Image (cartoon, rainbow, N blue to C red):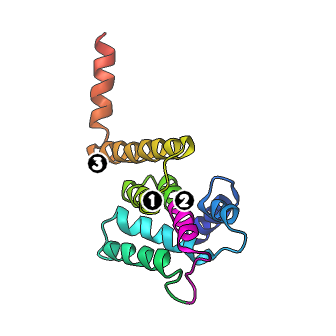
Amino acid sequence: MSELLLSLLREHDLSPRSLYSVVGALQDDFCSAIVAFLRGAALCISVRHSFSPQVVHVLNDLLYEGFVNDTVSLDGGMTDRGVYLSRLLLKAAQEFGSEPLLYLGLGAMRAIGLSASPSISHQVTMTLVKAERRKLDWALKVSKGKVLNLLQKEDGDV
């Protein structure tokens, strides 16, 4: 099963919509550990893991210092790192449908004085749609189809 999941992830990483592709497009010589960190952060945040609050400290170090350790670092000045980091957060939020990552990305944009472009607005919309769809999917799974059965009965009454 793990081999199947890894092969699907590798295939996804090759697509132009993946976080990995976006990171490569934003910076030629990028730190691939950032992709793994953002994906891990999205998962921790989505399940409300106890490590979630630490994400902000790591992002803060990346923004202000440019590095966390030898494997996770960003090049450039603080403004360049802020632009890069906010774009990465927004893309990770879109990939996962994560509202907390979306708000972190928008907060990073605001912190460095960036305004939202139409493409950012589109990204925000797509992230919120994906997050809402995930909530609805889980609600349907938890209800074991009771909602769907009610809707089918209502349609049949017409």
Position of 119 with respect to 107 (left or right) is right
Which residues make up the magenta segment? 70-88
Which residue does the numbered mark 3 point to in the structure image?
A: 142
Q: Quadrant of residue 21?
A: bottom right
Q: Which mark is residue 87?
A: 2
Image height of 62 relative to 121, above or below: below
Q: CA distance from mark 3 to mark 1?
A: 30 Å
Classify mark 2: helix, strand or loop: helix
> Callout 2 environment at 10 Å: few (<14), some (14 to 19), or many (20+)?
many
Hey, what amino acid is under mark 2?
Answer: Arg
Give the image location of residue 26, x and y in percent: 66, 62
Q: Which mark is residue 69?
A: none
In what quadrant of the picture does the N terminus appear?
bottom right
**Residue sitting nearer the eye, 66 or 153:** 66
Give the image location of residue 133, x and y in percent: 41, 42
Q: Quadrant of residue 91?
A: bottom right
Image height of 114 relative to 158, above or below: below
Image height of 13 relative to 119, above or below: below
What residue is shown at x 30% (from left), y 66% (from top)? 48
Disc 1 and disc 2 in contact, CB within 8 angstroms: yes
